[in-house]
Image (tube, rainbow, N blue to C red):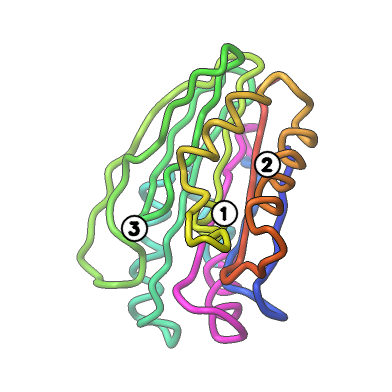
Amino acid sequence: LAAHYVPSRRVGGDAYDVIELPDGCLLLLVADVAGKGYPAALTMASVCSIVRTLAEGEPEPVAIVERLNRELVRSSVGGRFVTLALLRLDPCTGELAYVNAGHVPPLIVDLDGSVRHLPAGGPVVGAFEDMAWTAGFDQIAPGGVIMGFTDGLSELRAPDGALLGERRVAEIMSQTVGEPLMIIRDRLLDRATRFLAGGTPSDDLTVLAARRL
């Protein structure tokens, strides 16, 4: 596992989490609340707490997201939309069940450099009570990497106005997938820093990656 989180202000509305389930699977969460600063951070703290509580009795990502949505719509933090990717990974088999709720699609990168996106899911969380999401399924081969990130990475803007973009992120992952995971993360962040060319990120930036051994 490797992760990185930098808020654009003192606190931020991004989050990542790794939850070990009773059966040995891992639940990976990358999420982004609309807005920044303390209000977004408080909402995200509630989101992470609810997900951890639900995961104790419900291992399926879609069911967790549906219940999370109901909780947010009915609670005092309602009105703040949340995008998230929630992925249930079996480290032994590489089998993956996931849901993408309006989030930047996570990537699976195989050792040969091929890249797959994980878009299956549905709308953002917290907008309306009666919403539905679709489960996605995939499998990570030995040595493969899965990476989730927020749009604070893909929407980094260079001084000339160009965006880093999901395509460049995928290219960097493809070129470095054979390296140790920490090095992959650091090279990605180094590329992001050079892309900014001294500029300041305008959004929170979060990365969470896992390699199947």
Measured in 3D between alpha carbons, the distance from the residue under mark 1 to the one under mark 3, in whole angstroms, is 27 Å
Q: Crowding near pointer 3: few (<14 within 10 Å), some, many (20+)? A: some
Q: Which residues are magenta?
A: 22-49
Identity of the residue drawn at 57% across and 52% down: 56
| 38 drawn magenta | yes
| Count of labels in the image | 3
The one nearer the camera, 2 or 9, is 9
Measured in 3D between alpha carbons, the distance from the residue under mark 2 to the one under mark 1, in whole angstroms, is 9 Å
Which numbered marker is on residue 188? 2
The one nearer the camera, 183 or 141, is 183
| 77 drawn magenta | no
N-terminal label among 3 and 2: 3
Query: Label 3 sits on what residue type?
Result: Glu
Which numbered marker is on residue 66? 3
Answer with left or right where residue 131 lies relative to residue 121. left
Q: Quarter of the image holding residue 15? A: bottom right
Q: Quarter of the image holding residue 53? A: bottom right
Query: Label 2 sits on what residue type?
Result: Leu
Considering only vertical position in the picture, is 76 above or below 196? below
